[in-house]
Amino acid sequence: MLRIAYLGPEGTFTEAALLQMVTAGLIPGIPDGEAEFTPVLTDTTPGALAAVRNGAADYACVPIENSIEGSVLQTMDSLAAGSPLQIYAEFTLDVAFTIVTRPGHSGPIRTVAAFPVALAQVRRWLAANLPDADVVPTTSNAAAAHDVAEGRVDAGVSTRLAAQRCGLDVLADRVVDEANARTRFVLAGQPGPPPPATGADRTSVVLRLDNVPGALVAAMTELSIRDIDLTRIESRPTRTELGTYMFFLDCVGHIDDDSVAEALKALFRRCADVRYLGSWPTGSAAGALPPQLDEASQWLTRLRGGTA
Amino acid sequence: MLRIAYLGPEGTFTEAALLQMVTAGLIPGIPDGEAEFTPVLTDTTPGALAAVRNGAADYACVPIENSIEGSVLQTMDSLAAGSPLQIYAEFTLDVAFTIVTRPGHSGPIRTVAAFPVALAQVRRWLAANLPDADVVPTTSNAAAAHDVAEGRVDAGVSTRLAAQRCGLDVLADRVVDEANARTRFVLAGQPGPPPPATGADRTSVVLRLDNVPGALVAAMTELSIRDIDLTRIESRPTRTELGTYMFFLDCVGHIDDDSVAEALKALFRRCADVRYLGSWPTGSAAGALPPQLDEASQWLTRLRGGTA
Amino acid sequence: MLRIAYLGPEGTFTEAALLQMVTAGLIPGIPDGEAEFTPVLTDTTPGALAAVRNGAADYACVPIENSIEGSVLQTMDSLAAGSPLQIYAEFTLDVAFTIVTRPGHSGPIRTVAAFPVALAQVRRWLAANLPDADVVPTTSNAAAAHDVAEGRVDAGVSTRLAAQRCGLDVLADRVVDEANARTRFVLAGQPGPPPPATGADRTSVVLRLDNVPGALVAAMTELSIRDIDLTRIESRPTRTELGTYMFFLDCVGHIDDDSVAEALKALFRRCADVRYLGSWPTGSAAGALPPQLDEASQWLTRLRGGTA
Amino acid sequence: MLRIAYLGPEGTFTEAALLQMVTAGLIPGIPDGEAEFTPVLTDTTPGALAAVRNGAADYACVPIENSIEGSVLQTMDSLAAGSPLQIYAEFTLDVAFTIVTRPGHSGPIRTVAAFPVALAQVRRWLAANLPDADVVPTTSNAAAAHDVAEGRVDAGVSTRLAAQRCGLDVLADRVVDEANARTRFVLAGQPGPPPPATGADRTSVVLRLDNVPGALVAAMTELSIRDIDLTRIESRPTRTELGTYMFFLDCVGHIDDDSVAEALKALFRRCADVRYLGSWPTGSAAGALPPQLDEASQWLTRLRGGTA
């Protein structure tokens, strides 16, 4: 059975996203209609990717981007360094918290467990609803549920999945101060043939550029001149010297699209290094599709054959 | 006396950087040769910027970029939102830690206080030198020294400045696992006339772009076509929807350089919004200077006068 | 009185265009409402420009572009080489021919004088109307009228102006095989202050580029990035070696438009040589006006003053 | 036997260039070592191209560019309009004239026949050597020799080949006022498979662009971004309205070079119309070779197969 690594304990948002990917049939190697896999729980997100690298897992499910916090730097840095990994699927989860208590708890709520990142997103709700409770920091959203289940705190800011797993009561659901909070998760594995193009795909690369003026503009122009829609650009320091960066670029399209293939070749030629992170389905269209070159290719074939 | 806000408690790296700025005469309003200012200590880095915004301080000194961790997101997001602030000076500090103990402490070191970020950078040193000590997390590097001084722990991973302020012994100095760790700090205040151009200056802006393909390439081309050296580009989510970003751009040069001024005007015209973060001296040259347009301007003047 | 050189003899299309410029008040130095100047007739178009260069005339009126034949190469080459000249005005003339005969001529038309260039444009008319006449070549359109007046031929393909000057009868007017034939004429003089911007102006330059790949694209990008509308580009060999060219560029706008001024300075900086041919009114709008930078300039001024 | 059309009469520079092509084995369909073909003499250069179009000839040899005069507009316009033709070979001829007389002519030289274009290039020589001779215009350089042979003039400005053909004496050889005068000739036929790539090839297209700002820059960027060396750009009016142009572009490389093929497809996609004029050997390297994409293509193949 496929082994899939992800941040534990049971009930994390990551696990919730992974289950959605499984249900949607997005995971290569899990037949449609089946949903069985062997979970490999890790302490950290980079740990899940490491499990794939060292052979302890076939895939890792990891968060890569959050609409409020931005990129998940640990994930990006881990994908950019070490042995190559490749992304095969993604799922974007609406982030909203579930406030949990032990079944039958009826007294006042004096303590609330919360992961600090979550805390920042439910502060207004807590001020309005549990103004007198002391906040007890935890190491993850799921851990807050476990803390409640084990009686260390009266309530917890956690996930719906964790509430179910731990058999807790739901005091409030879909709690979040700022609307539109969403996290995108990806499924990474060893490099392999990308999943077939679906017409709604994303391709992602990490570029290292020679330190010459205009190098980044030139690389980006390789996409823009081909009308390839650049949907994301993130810079990250190379960790060697201040002022040197690598660049994460996402675009609409699949490596099997002629124009995307051309652009990848151009980047390969132009950049000090290109790390291909994969082409995979996004489920829904976002951005302009890459132009199809079929007609141009046919014209070229006719020219070469002298039959234009 | 000028009031300058920064992350406390006494002895933080931020304070060390600020003192260097003062000594170097980089702070507008503090006369050369003097070094007096009123410190306004804050709990957080955004809090220091807030102190400027609400009038509690004249300037804030804040970290903006680290060679290992990348941009300090809190600082960037705080500069990009809210009422405008402007940067007037910068200083880059080599980051290395000082391991401190109480004076006269002679017994075994069983506990070491460390800020988690620092811990990640001295792990190898601790494993080699204090393998048996338990690590006690603190809320800042400076706080680790205070914890030592107050007897809560045997040793602390802290700063040289904090060691001095707390009167502690230095067990080891310049401790850091990874060489070249450096943090850049900036001095931000209310908008005002930029400090005069020195020939080694940095100009910084935050761009919000219309969501059209090629908008970022077009904006960056406004710099590259003018041979202005783009030394840094960082994307940050706009916090409204996944996939929308604002961009922090740093370039070599000063708003009083003709070519930089031209580029700023072009960005103003092209972008949905441009927030000018300032032009200030960097102390040393880094990157290619913007081209001087004096000769071209004189030629233009002659053409207009009919005397070319 | 102003001396203006142009291709003779009396009655050329060039003279007709010049008279239109005079009537329209387009000639600097001729007061509105007056129409007096001293004609300086020359044998050739370059000869008219030479008359300005050697002081024999104040201005020269010369054809520069024809909708059928393209650029008038002699004019372009003459403007590009030798001492600088500057263009102050233009007028576009519909080209149509007048078939002339001597007053009272009633017999058959056995011979028709025609300038070879004109012949190519009235061939169908002649085939339909004078199929049996022999064509006698002349050295200009106006000369055909003079040949008729002096009895050397029965009819001539000439201009309406020449018919008037020579007192000839008009057999047919507005004769031309291909519709839309138009010629643009310009008025060139010694370099001087350009006429004031009118809002419908043209600016023209000749570029010599270093022979490096991308030099021309880079130069043109200096216009396109500034949204300056390039209305014409012509390459001409440098006459030194096959494969080296100079480029004539026309754009919409005036040297007093900020964005045009910026672009000129950028070309000056980028190109091996820029020869400014002038900024002058076109009478009617053609192409997109250059963007106004007033708002951007005011923003820049506020930034520099610290009052943005 | 192959029928090849060219400007007559016998002895033109065009014929000389054609013979060089034959000798060099550049003409598809003429086996190496053989030199036989059926000449099809025409009155004009466009007439030679028309002979190919109407089936009267298999190829036409025509001048396309002169280092002094620039492009041969008739050739370019004829290639750009009408049914498509394709170029298969080129040869560049040093242009220098041969002054011929009848064998045995010993009296004074009172008349010299000269084609007007040639006259412009030997004026200084005539002034120095035959100051008293009257110039009699002819319709081609070769015709000047025929005029001499037939006794209509004493001498002629002609070609060495015409001198041989007409059996004339050579009064002076290699006569030309301006050094470096060279004319490039091309061999055009019906569209067919281009000759194989040699490593020193030229590819040529005619572009018609939509009338939008930046269209030409965008088209040229398709070449420059791919590091394809644009060796020639010529604009020609479309002959419909002043200010609308088509563009002739020559680049280094062959349609079988991956990067040239990519650029052609991009132009096809971007331009209102692309007319391919062919890819053919130039004999010697001129300009930078197009980049080879083999390594990039192999990398792409590995990515697609999951074996990178």
Image (cartoon, coloured by chain):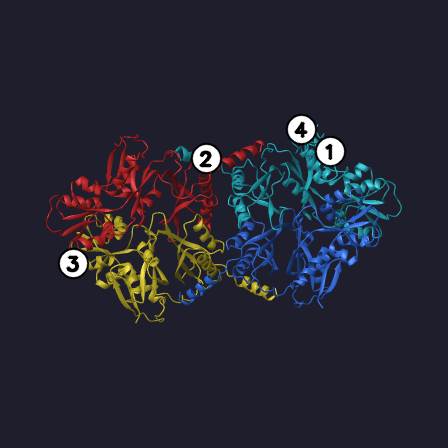
Chain colours: A red, B yellow, C blue, D cyan
Label 1 and label 4: CA atoms lie apart by: 20 Å
User: How would you rate the neighbour count of disc 2 (Cα within 10 Å): few for under 14, some for 14-19, many for 20 or more?
Assistant: few
Residue B108 in sight from this viewpoint: no
Pointers 3 and 4 in contact (C-beta within 8 Å):
no
Quarter of the image for residue D11 reads: top right
Label 1 element class:
strand
Pointers 3 and 2 in contact (C-beta within 8 Å):
no
Label 2 element class:
helix
User: How would you rate the neighbour count of disc 3 (Cα within 10 Å): few for under 14, some for 14-19, many for 20 or more?
Assistant: few
Residue assigned mark 4: D31
Label 2 and label 1: CA atoms lie apart by: 49 Å
**Dot 4: chain letter:** D
- Residue type at mark 1: give it: Val
- Looking at the rendered structure, which numbered label has been put on residue B199? none
**Dot 1: chain letter:** D
Residue C277 in sight from this viewpoint: yes
- Vertical placement of residue A265 versus C225, above or below: above
Residue A274 rendering spot, x and y as whole percentages: 41, 42
Residue assigned mark 1: D40
- Vertical placement of residue A257 versus C213, above or below: above
Residue A49 rendering spot, x and y as whole percentages: 30, 40
- Which of discs 3 and 1 lies nearer the camera? The answer is 1
Label 3 and label 4: CA atoms lie apart by: 100 Å
- Residue type at mark 4: give it: Pro
Residue assigned mark 2: D298
Residue C149 rendering spot, x and y as whole percentages: 82, 54
N-term-proximal mark, 2 vs 1 = 1
Label 3 and label 1: CA atoms lie apart by: 108 Å
Residue assigned mark 3: B151
C157 or C305, which is in the foreground? C157
Residue B231 rendering spot, x and y as whole percentages: 42, 54
Label 4 and label 2: CA atoms lie apart by: 37 Å
